[in-house]
Amino acid sequence: MIVDPESVREVLSNKSGHFGKQLFSRSFKLLGNGVVNHDGEKWAMHRRILNPAFHHEKIKRMLPVFATCCIDVINRWENSVSSEGSSEIDIWPELQSLTGDVISRTAFGSSYQEGRRIFQLQDNRRMKEIDREIHKILREVIGKREKAIKNGETNDDDLMGILLESNMRQSNGNAKLGLTTEDVIEECKLFYFAGTETTYWQERARQEVLTHFGRAIPDFDSLSRLKIVTMILYEVLRLYPPIVLLTRRTYKEMELGGIKYPAGVSLLLPIVFIHHDPNIWGKDASKFNPERFADGISNAAKHQGAFLPFGGGPRICIGQNFALLERFSFELSPSYTHAPYSLITLHPQHGAQIRLKKL
């Protein structure tokens, strides 16, 4: 177990090329055997073809979809509020549904209904049968898109269109230089399933948004001005990183932090422990304190490499820019039980019940 941030950074940067990915189980790969699972040349090719889909300029154009999906949720919440102006909801399935809607619309564009079908299937336990059905849906959508692109109908406003066009450019007619249909299916599955405190801070965030945007829908370039909102997002990601640990293994004998490890050693990088280490973050490491990010990530902790919500190095999460874009007041319900647990990503075991009040 490697807990020193400098050693973790060295493992994740993998400049030597001798720290590889652990092999995943067959059941895990059913969720999406894409870029996150590959190594070496295969990983490099997949990452190169996928990168254009997650470029800032492409993500910018998806902001209206984010806004539309959020407005739909807000309208539904408004309709659920009682005549007294408040109600209790379990926000966990609400946010899962919102995530599924956003991903369906941004990944599949006009074919987003097929995306919603995939999202609705993900909780089903008949994994192999469901996997075959998801493959069928994606194969049909990909076939239609590829035919449209060949007919000159470009569509680079959604992730699938960008991915397919990038793949055609990279391969330039040579199948060995591009992704197969099966590869594209796995990358779509991976994107789909990976993507699936106090009143004081809530008031500060709300006031900041109102100051910059009023009641208008935010534009992408102006989002960078939301300093308080960004501080809150970073602090939540520190306390509850989506992936609680990463694993690597040594390909040959390596020295790390003054210790020599032989080939074949499994290395565990416990992100959640590093994020809660008082020696790195101070005595209040277990407290929710967005103020620690007031001067940016590099000054938030004693070590600049201690903030790892999306991993690090060349394999840093390709969707991190996508993940950081998402007129009520909220407070925890007495029925809420704090029990985070890891099921690939971090989940609230008993849901997240909140009291919703209309302002």
Image: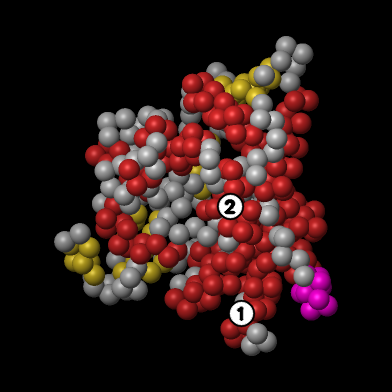
Q: Please name the residue shown 55% across and 56% down the image.
A: 319
Q: Name the residue under label 1.
A: 170
Q: Describe residue 33's horizontal placement relative to residue 117 as left or right.
A: left
Q: Quote the CA–CA distance across marks 1 and 2.
A: 23 Å
The C terminus sits in image quarter: top right
Give the amino acid at mark 1. Gln
The numbered mark, 1 or 2, whose residue comes first in the sequence reads 1
- Quarter of the image for residue 26 reads bottom right
Q: Residue 121's x, y, as percent?
A: 71, 52
Residue stretch rendered in magenta on the structure: 144-153
Up-down relation of residue 184 to residue 158 (above or below): below
Q: What element carries label 1?
A: helix
Q: Name the residue under label 2.
A: 322
Up-down relation of residue 204 to residue 100 (above or below): above
Q: Describe residue 163's horizontal placement relative to residue 343 as left or right.
A: right
Q: Residue 150's x, y, as percent?
A: 79, 79
